[in-house]
Amino acid sequence: MKPSVKAFLLVALVFLIGAAMGTGATLLYMKTHPRSFRALFFQAPPQTSDIIREEFTRRLRLDPEQERKLLDIWDRYSKRFQAIEDEFKDALRTELEQMREEMAPYLTPEQREFLFERLTRPPRHPLPPPPAPR
């Protein structure tokens, strides 16, 4: 057998052994940690407000009574902030639509398509993710 064929077979064998070990380790982890595996792959990611809330609780080192009271206040205001954000989004969408309608008569079809596409798509760089917990 040629040395290049032997080298290829050796690489393929190492790859297959690694794949088998990785599969086995994943199955073992799934069997021994079913709850954390489900949480990792089948639950929605935490909302920014939940991350902030956890950071808030951890950093302030609240006792149980403080935590209960402050988190009740936090939850109440979070709902109000969400309502304000929803109203803002609706108002912004309405204003953008009015602006597009006002601009349309002055643009060529190609210009209109380009501008309208730019006004309706989300920005390329949304807000950065929150810092990782320490």
Image: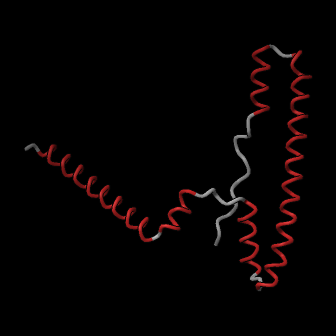
Q: Residue at x 74, y 35 (%)?
A: 121
Counting from the top left corner in percent of width and height, residue 70 is at 84, 76
Q: Residue at x 15, y 43 (%)?
A: 5
Image coloring type: secondary structure
Q: Is residue 9 above or below residue 93?
A: below
Counting from the top left corner in percent of width and height, residue 96 is at 87, 32
Q: Quadrant of the C terminus?
A: bottom right
The mark tally for this picture is 0
Q: Is residue 95 above or below residue 4?
A: above
Q: Residue at x 24, y 49 (%)?
A: 12
Which image quadrant for residue 115?
Answer: top right
Identity of the residue furthest to the top in this view: 108
Q: Is residue 21 above or below residue 105?
A: below
Q: Residue at x 56, y 56 (%)?
A: 42
For the residue pair 55 and 110, the one nearer the viewer reads as 55
Horizontal arrangement in the rendering, residue 78 relative to residue 7 (left or right):
right
Q: Is residue 103 above or below residue 75?
A: above
Horizontal arrangement in the rendering, residue 117 relative to residue 20 (left or right):
right
Which image quadrant for residue 81?
Answer: bottom right
Horizontal arrangement in the rendering, residue 21 relative to residue 78 (left or right):
left
Horizontal arrangement in the rendering, residue 115 relative to residue 132 (left or right):
right
For the residue pair 75 and 132, the one nearer the viewer reads as 75
Identity of the residue furthest to the left in this view: 1
Counting from the top left corner in percent of width and height, residue 1 is at 7, 44
